[in-house]
Amino acid sequence: MVEHEEDLDSFADWVKRNPVLGYDSESTGLDTFSGDKLRLAQFGTHRESWVLPAERGEIYRWYAARTLVYAEELICHNATYDLLVADKHLGVPLESTYHKTTDTRILSHLVDPRAAHEGGTGHGLEDLTSAYIDRAVAEEVKGSVREMAKQLKVTKSAFFAAVDIDHPGFNLYAGMDPVLASLLARQLEKRVPASARRLILYEHDVARVCALMERKGFLVDVPYLEQLHEELLEEQEFYEDQAATLGLDNVNAPQQVAAALMASGVEITGRTPTGKPRVDKRLLEQLANDGHELAAAVMKAKRASKWRVSYVDAFLDLRDSDNRIHCGIHSLQARTGRMSITRPALQTLPSGEHMIRSAFLADAGEVIGSIDYATMELRVLAALSGDRVMQEAFASGADLHQITADAAGVDRKVGKLSNFQRVYGGGARALAEATGLPLGTCESVGKAFDSTYTGVAAYSKRLQQQARRDGYITTVTGRRLPVDRSRAYSALNYMIQSSSRDVLGRALISMDEAGLTPHLRLPVHDEVVASLPKSQAEEIAAEIAAHMRMELRGVDIATDAELGGRSWGSLYI
DNA sequence: TCGTGACGCACC
DNA sequence: AAACGGTGCGTCACGA
């Protein structure tokens, strides 16, 4: 622990002797861009560490910054977080740290992408310490924060802001993290499957581009959000009152809603996995269409409250002082490698209409562009399976959904659903559920699919065999994807989803190399949202589309660029 | 009071 | 023969 300025010389000497440094930092909270402050900066090797009280003064921050800049290599767990904090609060740009950083979270994901509840190790520092270093140490570290928070009578999340900067337990905890990261790097590096070794660099590149997007942030329209807040609150209260007069106190309590509906004579046949009456949108919609007032009120109240709380208020709450939102872009998150976006979940905004997305704006003088892949997952399926019919359909621009429909003797809509269900690993039951058609019909649609796309059927079978034999499949990029043997049917979906994600990842790197990153705002699975200068919007959108487009085993993974106005919502009108 | 599982729902 | 994949998050309800 650097307690006094005089200790900094010893710290600097130690840094000189250790060019490879684990790095971690502690902040008051997670809002790097709005309000939270850096408290400690910790550097460590596999056997010792130094803790700098960054919050105590400029001199300590200066030493931390200097160390980050001059270290030859850095090892971080969740590098994006700590390096963005350093960028924002230590003035060390991401550009001078990320390229020399190893992120143990990335290594962990390449070793085993599964979360703890899926049978994997999980990817938290404590999870990994427990799995690869020492279970007792992990328990101790985890327990120590809980214990210290309890003593201070604060919650775990409030602890990091409340604890005294000199608290010995806090310093020990903080000092352990870079040591653990260093140890984990050794353990994890040797466990990355040989096929996935070349992904290490690639994933760090993808993560770096996503971190740059996070740092840039997405501008929001505050007056518009404030107006929406009022409107939705009024709407929510109106329909909650209406529900109350019909005898329902809490529209958000599904079992209370069930009780009130049953009291009005409605019979609820659906059951949840735990056996309770299922009250969901579909049921409420059905009842509302039949003129059931309570069901309609519940639906409208819930929608207004969800939209206000999850979107509008969240955006207002999470914006920084420049009215930009810096969501968390987790570039390597799902077990397939798919990305996720949190705080707020910008990949899951309503797409049926423009209201919520209209809150997001291109920068001044710019317009929103959306560049996406056309039926990406089916194209990837065509490429990887080598299915002739599917490949020919894409090559000639034929209507794949119609081909499926014709082969099965059903509507194009059913053909389309059938194609997508197949990508998701769905069977006849799922298709019947989605279409409302009899199970028997859906079974014959499945048979028609298999006899039309024989290459797909064979490919799926091959993947399932691999999954049952090895417990995992390996993607074309070398990524190892564990597949539960009891759910071998999901192998095809994992392969397609993961490969699609890697197409997007490759595109992000390609765009970054071309200097396009400052325009990028969000990756959304098969789409990139961008803010583009009005005068060159078409050219740059075309350039982005060209970088995204790729040929995979002779199949064109085609892209479309769409330009809107100032708001993201303008694309949804 | 806090953490967690169940549930529902937003997306690709 | 049969098999719906991957997320994040708000609320309620419950148990420690």
Image: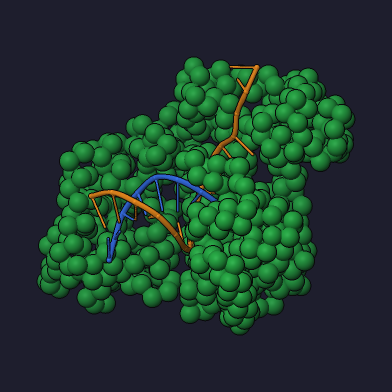
Chain colours: A green, B blue, C orange
Taking depth in this image into account, of C13 and A205 the one nearest to the observer is C13
Taking depth in this image into account, of A251 and A81 the one nearest to the observer is A251
* Residue A120 in sight here: yes
Left or right of A388, for residue A347: left
User: Looking at the image, which residue is at 52% across and 43% down?
Assistant: A272
Q: Quadrant of the N terminus of chain A?
A: bottom left
Label count reads 0
Percent position of residue A148, x then y: 17, 61
Percent position of residue C10, x then y: 48, 63
Left or right of A176, for residue A193: right
Left or right of A330, for residue A546: right
Percent position of residue A497, x then y: 60, 38
Taking depth in this image into account, of A273 and A464 the one nearest to the observer is A273
Instruction: Give the image quarter of residue A519.
Output: bottom right
Q: Measured along the vertical axis of the image, is residue A253 above or below residue A386? A: below
Q: Measured along the vertical axis of the image, is residue A209 above or below residue A57? A: above
Taking depth in this image into account, of C9 and A467 the one nearest to the observer is C9
User: Looking at the image, which residue is at 60% across and 46% down?
Assistant: A268
Instruction: Give the image quarter of residue A151.
Output: bottom left
Percent position of residue A279, x then y: 58, 51
Left or right of A129, for residue A32: right
User: Looking at the image, which residue is at 66% across and 50% down?
Assistant: A282
Q: Quadrant of the C terminus of chain A?
A: bottom right
Q: Measured along the vertical axis of the image, is residue A457 above or below residue A31? A: above
* Residue A513 in sight here: no
User: Looking at the image, which residue is at 24% across and 57% down?
Assistant: A43
